[in-house]
Amino acid sequence: MAFARTCSVALVGVDGVIVEVQADLEPGVAAFTLVGLPDKALTEARDRVRAAVVNSGETWPQRKLTVGLSPASVPKSGSGFDLAVACAVLAAAERLDPSAIADLLVIGELGLDGRVRPVRGVLPSVLAAADAGYLRVVVAEQTAAEASLVPGVTVIGVRSLRQLVAVLTGAPEPEEPPDPVGGRPDPLMAGLMLPGAGVRGLPGDAAARMDLADVAGQYEARRALEIAAAGGHHLYLKGPPGAGKTMLAERLPSLLPPLTQKEALEVTAVHSVAGLLPAGRPLIDRAPYCAPHHSTTMPAIVGGGSGLPRPGAVSLAHRGVLFLDEAPEFPVRVLDALRQPLESGEVVIARSAGSMRLPSRFLLCLAANPCPCGRHSRRGEGCECTPAMVSRYQGRLSGPLLDRVDLQVQVAPVTRAELMQRDSTAETTEIVAARVLVARERAAARLAETPWRTNAEVPGYELRTRWQLASGALNDAARQLERGLLTARGLDRVLRVAWTVADLAGRDRPDRRDVRTALVLRTGVEQGLPLTERFDGWSGPSGPAPEGDGDPVEKEKRPARPRTARTKPDRHAETEETVV
Ligand SMILES: Nc1ncnc2c1ncn2[C@@H]1O[C@H](COP(=O)(O)OP(=O)(O)OP(=O)(O)O)[C@@H](O)[C@H]1O
Ligand SMILES: [Mg+2]
């Protein structure tokens, strides 16, 4: 028989498409043709496969050889088809039994010496194979653990083509030393790693030692962090240099609950396609963290690049945290490109060869100084920037982008007393994460019959109509809506945060104080209330005790403070609520 076929997988984003690899041998002048929309790396497979077959002690058929990859309409790239092509050729040449490879799914790159090298995207490939009903897959030994994450599939991990031939023919397996190159290349050196991307808190990682208790003071920002983690709300930390914004954001991923099995597979699939799976940990089961530098290019943020397109920062942060430090320094185009993934939870990259979809449901955390010199304050002390410079700097974060950010927090400089005194009541990450988990479970139980899991995902209409708030809870928000300080979309977002505040406080539904807390956090405008008052009813310990009785509803009956004594709403708060 001069024809044989086996299967492999082409990746389109993080979706796998089963590709049939067919080999046909005809009498004629020795030649090797590869058809079926291969890219440059795949065309080079011809030379790699021929050398690998010969160096594995097999005979290369001296006939007219055609290898076809079907369906021909799907673009195929990379070197992951090498092993499948070699198997099909050997079966067509009657060195292997064609029926032994017909129901096999084969993924791996071949070295010229016949070694099988790992490729990116093994997990999504094997997931696609399992969906298509394949029961046995062959991969490089280094990626066998990753492939084994998929239930119901038998994984054969091989070191070389020679070893695979022995397995398939029932011959004794040759002794193969482990790969001297040692598994995968360093992702950073291979140009795969996006600096700042990764999974936080792995053992041995410096981030594992970062704890929320290290942050002195900043009670309001810490609570905003807790609310963001509990409800999946996006967060914007504004403040002068050295106030602890970066410190706070770095501690956000460890507040998020561990990923469910389904989420873990999704996240691992993205990191597998990016070639970034942490060594020895095939499954990523905790929230990833991605903090790209502001000089990072557009394709590195949203995904793309030549060859096998790579997930960008928005996808590497899927189910985790995307932190844009010094956010106004990012190109405006890049910031605005975040709007689509923020809205839909996925990014679609269109190419001439076709489009691909990558998941990107992340928690966005922005941090910014108030102006280029960082010293601009409402009193304007010490700031060297002109008003035009300040407004240009702040204007780089567009209204529509900020409109998607539910929590906007002013991070004030820490006082000397806060910094020098060891605060024995400072809560650790463990304590706050436990509260976040309880709040998430509360929300998940309420949303059990719906497709959503966190408050941030629930559409506004559902939020307004499906679940009741305590009576009078919406009074303040309604008043702001009438005054034109809050838009309809703004109201929906306030409601979402109010539900999270109620979940954290263990209440069945938000009351008026929860909505006020949400309003303050949404608009960044203090509503004429002392800061600590916003968090009345909070279940966890808080910062300095509120003055007086701390009841905002009671306080409201008191005469309003003169306008001058009240904090002036900042520019973003005004624009975001009035523009949209
Ligand atoms: N609240 C705080 N508690 C303890 N240490 C702090 C706090 N704020 C700042 N620091 C110290 O200052 C350093 C700088 O803080 P961080 O980088 O978080 O500031 P930042 O607000 O991000 O500043 P920038 O705007 O310049 O980026 C921290 O590494 C820490 O040592
Ligand atoms: Mg910083």
Image (spheres, helix red, strand yellow):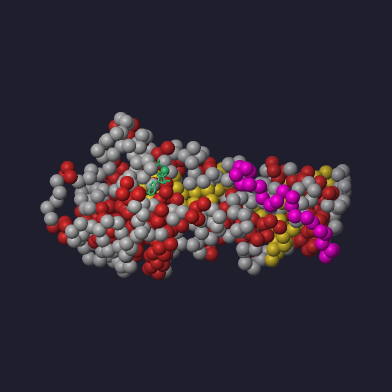
Query: Residue reaching furthest front?
Result: 421
Magenta-colored segment: predominant secondary structure: loop
At a point 72% along the width and 43% down the height, the residue shown is: 43
Total numbered circles? 0
Is 129 on the left or on the right of 545, as rendered?
Answer: right
Magenta stretch: includes residue 178: yes
Locate residue 437: give its quadrant: bottom left
At a point 46% along the width and 62% down the height, the residue shown is: 257
Is 22 on the left or on the right of 29, as rendered?
Answer: left
Locate residue 477: give its quadrant: bottom left
Is 56 on the left or on the right of 263, as rendered?
Answer: right
Q: Quadrant location of the N terminus?
A: bottom right
Locate residue 458: give its quadrant: bottom left
Q: Which range of residues does the magenta coloring cover?
A: 169-192
Magenta stretch: includes residue 286: no
Measured from the top left, where is residue 440 in percent x and y?
40, 64
Measured from the top left, where is residue 51 in percent x and y?
81, 46
At a point 35% along the width and 37% down the height, the residue shown is: 374
Q: Nearer the viewer, residue 412 or 332?
A: 412
Q: Is residue 392 above or below residue 524?
A: above
Could one spot residue 327 in this view of the protein?
yes
Taking the image in four quarters, ligand 2 sits in the one at: top left
Could one spot residue 340 in this view of the protein?
no
Q: Nearer the viewer, residue 107 or 55?
A: 55
Q: Nearer the viewer, residue 249 or 458?
A: 249
Measured from the top left, where is residue 418 in percent x and y?
32, 50
Measured from the top left, where is residue 470 in percent x and y?
25, 66
At a point 34% along the width and 52% down the height, the residue shown is: 421
Is 460 on the left or on the right of 81, as rendered?
Answer: left
